[in-house]
Image (cartoon, rainbow, N blue to C red):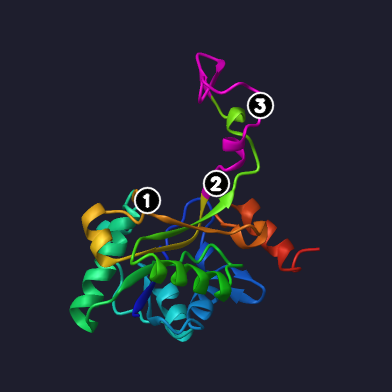
Amino acid sequence: MRILALIPARAGSKRLLGKNLLEVGGKSLIARAIEVAGQIPEICDILVSTDGDDIADAARSAGALVPWLRPSELSSDDAPSIEVALHALNWYESEKGPIDGLLLLQPTSPFRTKETIQAGIDLFRDGSGKSVISVSPCHFQATWLFNISNGLLQPLNPNEIAGSQNEESKKIHMVNGAFYLASPEQLRFHKSFLSEHSIPLVIDSKREALDIDTEFDYRMALLLSNELI
């Protein structure tokens, strides 16, 4: 099985400046993602898609393939991530040959383990190429979700009784951003990693599911890596 690991690392992060080069545990987020991907035998290449020279240099130094800088139309705040994935997929298959799956590994999940990645690839193989997406249990009830309309709280699901916790509420999971894997066929047809046939890769560890998007998330990562006293 040939899996291409794609690490998207845009330079222009607004919420947390320069986040892909921030260090956790003595290594940059981009280097950590490359390192863990390099331990998986099914991964044939690790391609970093970036628009930043500094990130490209760091990625190459860590052993990743950076064949180009991402085009400007794929580097804006509102550029769809699926278009970034398809751009890399189309280039790679035209230059290096067909692959069985594209694995998206965001650098912002610094505690993602090789065991989790391997488990996700095994699910993908056993599921005959259905997409696999990592999720985590939600530690709140569905009945706690509200919209605010005209200054008042409106239940997101009016059919649920506030304060109740039924069995369905206990099964709610949320996408955590650590692992997305799909076949080229699905990505080109659905224009998404997610489909009605997506298989969940459940990550129970809050540490491993941490996704760094803000300064608070980064400080939490430093705490979890024993860097911040």
Q: Report the Cα–Cα distance between label 3 and label 1.
A: 39 Å
Dot 2 or dot 3: first in sequence order is 3
Label 2 to label 1: alpha-carbon separation: 27 Å
Q: Amino acid at mark 1?
A: Asp
**Circle number at residue 173:** 2
Per the image, label 1 sits on a secondary structure element best described as loop
Taking the spot 31% from the left edge, 57% from the top edge, the residue there is 82
Q: Which mark is residue 51?
A: none
Q: Which residue is mark 1?
A: 77
Q: Position of residue 103 (x, y in %)?
A: 39, 69
Q: Position of residue 70 (x, y in %)?
A: 30, 67
Specify start and end residues of the magenta stretch as a single range: 147-174
Circle 2 residues within 10 Å: few <14, some 14–19, many ≥20: some
Task: Name the residue type under label 3.
Answer: Ser
In the rendered image, the vertical position of residue 10 relative to residue 14, given as above or below? below
**Apparent side of residue 141 relative to residue 183 in the rendered image (left or right):** right
Which residue is tagged 3?
Answer: 164
Quadrant (top left, top right, bottom left, bottom right) of the N terminus:
bottom left
Q: Residue at x 48, y 77 (%)?
A: 37
